[in-house]
Image (tube, helix red, strand yellow):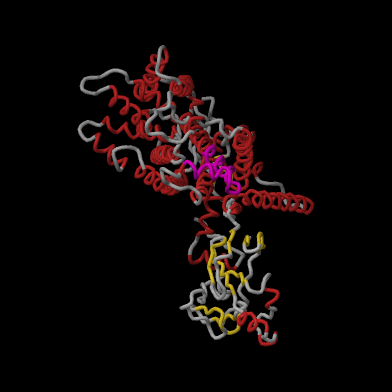
Amino acid sequence: MATTATPPEHADEEDTRRDFLLIATGTLTAVGVGLAAWPFIDTLNPARDTLAVATTGVDLSPVEVGQAITVVWQGKPVFIRHRTEKEISEARSVPMDVLVDPQMDQDRVQKPEWLVQIGVCTHLGCIPLGQKPSDPKGDYGGWFCPCHGSHYDTAGRIRRGPAPKNLEIPPYDYVEESRILIG
Amino acid sequence: MEEKTWKNPTIAWIDRRMPVFTMMHHDLVDYPTPRNLNYWWNFGSLAGIALTIMIVSGIVLAMNYVPHVDHAFESVERIMRDVNYGWLMRYLHMNGASFFFIVVYIHIFRGLYYGSYKPPRELLWMIGVIILLAMMATAFMGYVLPWGQMSFWGAKVITNLFSAIPLVGESIVTWLWGGFAVDQPTLNRFFSLHYLLPFVIFGLVFLHLVALHTSKSNNPLGIDVKGPQDTIPFTPYYTIKDAFGLGVFLIAYLGFVFFAPDFFGEPDNYIKANPMQTPPHIVPEWYFLPFYAILRAMTFEIWFITAKLGGVILMFGSVLILLALPWLDRSPVRSGRFRPIFKIFFWLFVVDCVLLGMVGARPPEGVWVMIGQAATAFYFAFFIIILPLLSVLERPRPLPASINTAVTRSGAGAPAMGAAE
């Protein structure tokens, strides 16, 4: 009486046909769920108004030699130092083989006297000291991160401590003689 | 519960210590389900899916929404214009509310027609009514959040309903508002509660399912399951039927989301809330229109009850009366299929609810006042007079001996056939 409701006996051909249907359905379902999930995931990415304020313009003219300013770009501090001749020559005289993350000072600046870099330690994201005259500048005259003791030199390169990389250089351009646009 | 042995050692390890997989297998796979459920039985699982869609899209919206009177409206427009797929999230949520109510109303009418509220499912039904109330509160508060003109004035009108309560009414309204007008404190607490209540509903749905799986599903014949020959396992038979229904549901729902997203909305809600100016014609969202019509049907006093208080009592009463339904309809026959007179009144009741909705959408003028009052009278008469009387007066048609004999060819041929006695 109840036999009509039970599925047909599992013949071999029946199995392969059913397997195919199951795998095809499962694959399509997975693709569909993935496509449906994407809009939900993408809402968490930066919105268009956030992207629209992603550039920062900086007037460099008031910054004297030896001074440094910190500006905000994309919510992060950007260190701009008007380097002295001494700092530049120090940075350029360092042999490459003593550097943790070897990079020429010339590759880190567009104009030698202006060093522009993101002021976020490449170790775990603290903001290194060295912008204010009263700040410790570390053993190499650049920046010193107080969180875990990373020392950066006058080119912003990591010299000692746990940080793996040099301070990051943001994309920027000189839009005028003494004006840059970061981002 | 029969022991299930799991081949996968990790699942077996977990299951011995916490039998969630056995429970899931028991309630989602082996679960014996009447073999004759029709497509009206799809709407329970659809309601669960609608709730899930609302929670997921709502969580994403809350990440970008600002519950502040100066920023709420703008933050919603920012969601529409700047947030990646924000327009989709908002339209899913807006139309999701409408479709959640469509699905739940069909689910309720199905329960009404097939007598799913009768013993032993009274508590199952009552939990469902509580879920409806929680849904209404959630939907109302959610509609306030975009802080448009309809949001603001809807909030004002609905909270003012409580001022009809004698003596303490005004104090209650001030307490609800957190001030002396619908303002920042009101918006902030509505946002908090709008985020909380869906999870309360989720908990209530769980209780609804515990009650369901205790008394098991009703069926279109309304007769009890008498043995294994009357049931089929939930998986694959009803999982695939629910999945098919889900596909149809999504086509309709997403059709509105993509091609007519503002169909259910009010244009006035794209105007920022202005506490100094009421829109010329305030209407609630469509799913509240029948209740709104009942609220406005009361245009006269009865003894010490003012028209205002009377309307409020009737409106809340129109939902709360559903709690008493298992004791108002005493007919032992569940399914409307075997109740010829009930069937007629059921459809009249459906028409009456639609009519109330039409009345609620119109300004309370001219003939619509009378129609609204007559429809309200019929609404309550259906529960208080017609159903109790039918329980006694109606002569139901004979019931089939069992589900199996009624719906399968082999069952019908069997000697157990007893429907024609």
- Compared to B238, does B393 lie above or below? above
State the image coordinates of residue B143 (x, y, percent, origin top left).
45, 38
Q: Examine the residues drawn in magenta and state their main secondary structure.
A: helix
Left or right position of B298 against A40: left
Q: How many marks?
A: 0
Q: Residue at x 35, y 42 (%)?
A: B186
State the image coordinates of residue B352 (x, y, percent, origin top left).
45, 21
Q: Residue at x 50, y 76 (%)?
A: A129
State the image coordinates of residue B400 (x, y, percent, origin top left).
52, 30
State the image coordinates of residue B59 (x, y, percent, origin top left).
50, 50
Outermost residue, top side: B367
- Compared to A56, does B46 lie above or below? above
Q: Residue at x 43, y 24 (%)?
A: B281
Q: Which residues are magenta?
A: B73-96
Q: Residue at x 54, y 72 (%)?
A: A68
Judge whether residue A73 is colored magenta: no
Residue sitting nearer the eye, B49 or A6? B49
Classify residue B250 by image quadrant: top right
Residue sitting nearer the eye, B195 or B41? B195
Q: Is residue A68 visible?
A: yes
Residue sitting nearer the eye, B332 or A54? A54
Residue sitting nearer the eye, A26 or A7? A26
- Compared to B93, does B15 lie above or below? below
Classify residue B201 by image quadrant: top left
Left or right position of B217 against B126: right
Q: Is residue B340 visible?
A: no
Classify residue B294 by image quadrant: top left
Outermost residue, right side: A13
